Image (cartoon, rainbow, N blue to C red):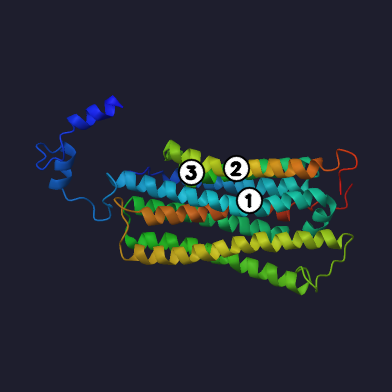
Amino acid sequence: MSGHIASPKLYYAVFFALIVGTVLTYLAALVDFGFFNNVVMLAIAFAKASLVILFFMGVRWNSRLTWIVAASGFFFLLIMFAITMSDYMSRGWVPGTLK
Amino acid sequence: MPDSRMHAEHYPGPLHNPPVRSAEVQRSASHAHHPKLQHHFDDMDQQLEASTLGMWVFLVTEIMFFGGLFMAYLMYRWANPTAFQEASAHLNKFWGAVNTIVLIVSSLTMAMAVRSAQTSARPRTQVAWLLATMSFGTAFLGVKVVEYSDKFQHHLVPGPHFQWPGQYPAGAEIFYSLYFCMTGLHAIHMIIGLGLMTVIAIMAGRGKFNGAYYTPVEISGLYWHFVDIVWIFLFPLLYLIGAHYGAGH
């Protein structure tokens, strides 16, 4: 079987980046950016998740089909968030329709 | 359809004596294949790819499973923004951060466990990486026990005994319902992961895995990393949104 074998150095580098990301998230939360605290924490979380998926889970070296399947999970999650929130956030926009 | 009839006319019927066997068939007949190769796969690479893909399909269902709770979080936080900040401020950021780092370390040791199987390391080495992964996973659950018992003592578990000293008891109770559902479901996944790793460690100890066959380690590793990813999102969304409650809000 010839699955890709990554070097330990790469794994340690990814690990280091994940620890740095965690410390950054923690420190950024202590500074008051108002709403942008959410943007910062989610941006770091997505970056960390991408590192885990690409390197620790090895999707970087998988077939295109695996890429698409993995991405589809997050894509459908976005559809669920977008459509549900478009409902909740738009309730009452038309006067007299909010029950 | 004239075409299909023509085809039927020219169909030579079943071949009783296939005259020439393809080079592929001859090769597989003359060489013994790997005992772990299932007959419906061409080779070990294709078999591993199919397993990886199948695991990812399962993980997509897991993304949607946790996604429902993240959806509930998003909606209720949108409806109760200040209450969620007030409630989150009562969680212990320090323990949350410690657990995040513990899980990241366990993901590193998991990746190294898969690598040790890929490189045909000695069974003892493979088991050592797996046991390291399991001990970090157990440490994570240990911290969770400390946190949960603290919440029980302070009446922060939603239900008839929920008591909230702050301004927004109703919103805080929703926050703690989500906190227990999300971290609870995550903890159940950790426990299942520990069970998986126990089986994998026993198999590794018996020398089942090497560079030619390591699919079970790889697949269980995917699951372990997925659980880590869920926590990467849970940590900031639950623990870190209340740091500035009361400051300008």
Q: Residues within 10 Å of mark 3 (few under 14, many from 20)?
A: some
Of the residues shown, which amino acid type is indicated by label 2?
A: Phe
- Find disc 1 in the rendering and name its residue: B67
Pointers 2 and 1 in contact (CB under 8 A)?
A: yes
The quarter holding residue B152 reads bottom right
Q: Residues within 10 Å of mark 2 (few under 14, many from 20)?
A: some
Q: Which mark is residue A55?
A: 3
Query: In the rendering, at what x and y percent does residue A31 appear?
Result: 78, 45
- Find disc 2 in the rendering and name its residue: A76
Query: In the rendering, at what x and y percent does residue B144 appear?
Result: 64, 66
Given residues B40 and B119, the one toward you in this image is: B40
Instruction: Give the residue at x 59% y 44%.
Output: A48
The secondary structure type at the circle numbered 1 is helix
Given residues B140 and A35, the one toward you in this image is: A35
The secondary structure type at the circle numbered 3 is helix
Marks 2 and 1, how far apart at CA:
9 Å
